Image (cartoon, helix red, strand yellow):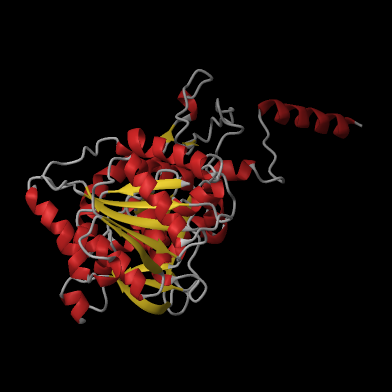
Amino acid sequence: MVAKITFPGSVLRVLNYNENKVKEGCATLIHAANFLQDKEDMTFYNKLERFQHLHNLREDIRTHTLHISLNFHPTEKFTPDGLTTIADDYMNRIGFSGQPYLIYEHYDAGHPHIHIVTTSIKADGSPIRLHNIGKYKSEPARQAIEIRYGLVHAQGQKELLKGIHPVDVQKIIYGKMETKRSIINVLDAVLKKYKYSSLAELNAVLQLYNVTADRGKEGSRVFQKGGLVYRVVDDKGNKVGVPVKASSIYSNPKLAYLEKRFHDNQSLKEPHAKRVKTAIDWALAGQRQMSIAQLLTTLEKDGISTVRRQNATGQLYGLTFVDHKTKCVFNGSALGKQYSAAGLQQRCAGTTQTPVSQQKVMQPDNLSTGDQVDRDSPVLLNSFKQDKVSTQQVPGLAEPLLASTGIIEQLFQPEYNFQGPEQSRRRRRRKRLLDND
């Protein structure tokens, strides 16, 4: 069993989330503990008022709502009564047996699981301590319940944990996966973990999993009201299915929330821009020819996905880089002209040369075996005197990275034969001997 506890800012949103699941046929309310009415007799507002009455007793406390999910192995089967028994035992062990709580059984995932909605405010107005409740209360309760009911233990159940805490989120395929649940899974894995500073950058990540955040057309009512919907898109970026309003998702990922993230992420991601630029420079350094497609494939191996923006004719006009190692998103042009779509197309089409602004430049005259090489930046030897050519090996690199310009380019041509003074004297001596014969 895996237990997960979250602390939403609003009990209204959590109730809406679970009650909407019931309306959609994806969940059932199987138990209502410590309510004045039976679950069948309660309306939505009866449930909400029960919680709000307790919250009004301590208006100074903001964190008072708990949304708990108990998740079981796909091979385990339970009746509603069996799930209720386990949930009651869990709530008793974490100190919430006297609190009002609702238990919903959900059917929108590949494993059995229930959601529990409750509050930490007691009837006398005193709060239940929530600090480290997961570590000191929930974890011991989980272990005891696994033993008592013979459940599959959470440790080692990687396939179950992956479904609950998605990292490599499966792409949504419209018609094959429950749309809203799948969108929420993607948002949970992206919104708080990746650093993006605009809606376009956020969509660069979301579209990797066939989801997009949509403000609507500029003249539309949704756009004018500052609204936001999330949609499923196919592999070509076409929108499919019914949009899901941001306000209908319990985590409330509306535009105002995203705009705050845009502002906070801007400074957080800046220190990581160098890694993306260096990865691009290294991919191009020393290459005679490399297409954009080959460059993007090389970056993918380094954990950097690239989202292309093309017009109707297929012309590439924009690139956005998603670095999965640092969880940062960068528009190519924001990294510099050399890293924009146009800049990279020029670098790939012509002689691939690392931008001077992003590298450590060394002259052959002062490069010695004792020089220290900046291993985060390619070394470019791009200034040679024609009367003194150095092909000295650079410490730390397999071979020197030489700009293919002028005499250096000629040196690499197989038909070019450098002849110094000694070679010239030998040739003249051989010619005189031949003439004397």
Residue 10 against residue 174 in the figure, above or below: above
Viewport quadrant of the C terminus: top right
To which quarter of the image does residue 418 belong? top right
Residue 202 against residue 401 in the figure, above or below: below
Residue 353 against residue 129 in the figure, above or below: below
Looking at the image, which residue is at 49% across and 61% down? Answer: 79
Looking at the image, which residue is at 24% across and 54% down? Answer: 100
Q: Nearer the viewer, residue 257 or 49?
A: 49
Q: Nearer the viewer, residue 298 or 362?
A: 298
Q: Nearer the viewer, residue 427 or 72?
A: 72
Please indicate, yes or no, whether residue 194 appears anywhere in the rendered image: yes
Q: Nearer the viewer, residue 251 or 135?
A: 135
Q: What x and y, as percent, mark residue 318?
A: 39, 64
Task: Identify the residue at the far right of this view.
Answer: 437
Residue 415 against residue 311 in the figure, above or below: above
To which quarter of the image does residue 204 belong? bottom left
Q: What x and y, as percent, mark residue 46?
A: 18, 67
Looking at the image, which residue is at 45% across and 73% down? Answer: 315
Looking at the image, which residue is at 52% across and 61% down? Answer: 110
Please indicate, yes or no, whether residue 230 appears anywhere in the rendered image: no
To which quarter of the image does residue 247 belong? bottom left
Side of 301 relative to 130 (left or right)? right
Q: What x and y, as percent, mark residue 161?
A: 49, 48
Q: What x and y, as percent, mark residue 256?
A: 18, 61
**Count of numbered circles in the view:** 0
